[in-house]
Image (cartoon, rainbow, N blue to C red):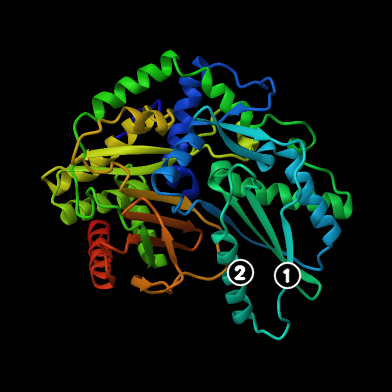
Amino acid sequence: MSMNQNQIPAGWESLPLAVRDAVLAELQAKYLADGPVSRLPELLVAERSEYMPASLEQQYIWQRQQANAYTLGWATAVPAMLFEAVDMAALESALWSLQSQHGSLRTRLVVKDEALYQCVDDRQPLPLREQKLPRWRGRAATITEIGRRQRTLVEERFELASGPLWRALVLRRGKDAVLLMSFCSVIFDGGSLALVQQQLYALYQHAKDATPLPEELQKAPLQYRDYAQWQQQLRGHELWRERLHWWQENLKGAVPAVEGEGSAPAELSTRLYEQTLSKATCAQLDDYAQSNETTPFVVMLTEFMATLHELDSHDDIWVAAPSANRPLAGTETMIGNFMRQVLLRQQWPEQQDDRLAAVHTTVSEALEHGDLPHQLIAEMLPQEAGAGNPYRYFFNYRHAEAQGEEADDMDIEFAVEPEQMLVNREEQILLMVLESENSRQIHWYLRESRFDAARAETLLKRYFARLKLRIGA
């Protein structure tokens, strides 16, 4: 079950686990670096105007929000950033510099002649607020309070036309401070999250101690609006035509409808449930994946598809998965939304022994043709009466910072999060695997109207049992 050698670098099995597991980002980046990128026009600084085209990613998010009366969750929270003995003047200077460096943080999105445009202001007020944390609270109570205030920040509505499309909140406690930030998804993705943290710390140290700035912060970078303008050149490009033809052939036919889909307005509220893989189970998962010349991503995805097959009784399984999309020089230092949703369509094999290889091949082929905005794929999907939503099930495998605590010695196969852990999502099921150095957390966001607590527990435990049975745990 070996992948095409144009897609996998030699000796990939010996790469660090963090590299191997990022299969979506790594395979696509490798493929693009070897082939299609050389056929694409170079990313250059575009001529500036008051109205710049919105990117295809921004258009897709905007259209989905319109279709759901702007009820979907579309804010991304940056993990809390601690500043001990904070220099508030330096922190404020760093935030100003970050906003000045990235036009996306000064962007508004406006509708003109029924089309969406970016308007990038030369200067916007800094969306920074400051609040106090009670000093008498213990550590656990303080962490809970920080989490509560972060949820409140994320729940605040963004106004596209007036901006700002991000917010910062400083929580002071004595000499120390915690910085919370929330970004609208039209200007932000997972790659931007790490970038914001790295650049903000560097800018803070520079303002505080005059430390040298990284090279990327010493020059005027390409901006996200340049990327959006670059996309306009590719509408009729031969590479995109080739990709669209492949997807048209691969996605022929209607998506089978499942429970909860119909003409009535959908209830979008989802609840979070959690699972944890023990260190021993994580090791068995890694060993199993390596021995089968695949990745833990593919192994866990296979059992997710098996769970969906049992749930819906359909052999035609559709799952969306995010793919990092920053292969072009200059995009690696941009704050913006570059996320692609790769559709994985799997005809479910009857034989258990054939399933891992089949899913492996499906992922490989989809990534080979995945360097295409999913907005274009969504536009060409057949709109048949009674068809299901191809993006109803979502599988996301990502890396998270270690929290400094050892993984539980025992597997946790079902845990319910508190009442406040609710969010509106289009997906009926989102399975998110968060891998750190010492654990794998599995987060399930399940549509409340379809899955009550009892049904959710059954679903999660069946997935857990399948996964452990496959890897011999």
Examine the rendered structure and indicate whether residue 302 appears above or below residue 151. above
Question: Could you tell me how many numbered marks the image carries?
Answer: 2
Examine the rendered structure and indicate whether residue 370 appears above or below residue 183. above
Does residue 191 appear left or right of residue 308 in this picture? right
Q: Secondary structure at mark 2?
A: helix
Whichever of labels 1 and 2 marks the residue nearer the N terminus, that label is 1
Examine the rendered structure and indicate whether residue 8 appears above or below residue 244. below
Q: Quadrant of residue 423?
A: bottom left
Q: Looking at the picture, how far across and down is residue 349, in whole percent? A: 14, 42
Quarter of the image where the C terminus is located: bottom left
Residue corresponding to mark 1:
131
Does residue 376 appear left or right of residue 228 in this picture? left
Residue corresponding to mark 2:
149
Q: Which residue occupies 76% across, 48% down?
A: 125
The amino acid sitting under disc 2 is Arg
The residue furthest right is 210
Crowding around mark 1 (Cα neighbors within 10 Å: few <14, some 14 to 19, many 20+) is few
Report how far apart the C-alphas of labels 1 and 2 lie in the structure. 10 Å
Q: Nearer the viewer, residue 352 or 423?
A: 423
Q: Looking at the picture, how far across and down is residue 145, in whole percent? A: 61, 75
Q: Which residue occupies 77% across, 67% down?
A: 84
The amino acid sitting under disc 1 is Gln
CB of mark 1 within 8 Å of CB of mark 2?
yes
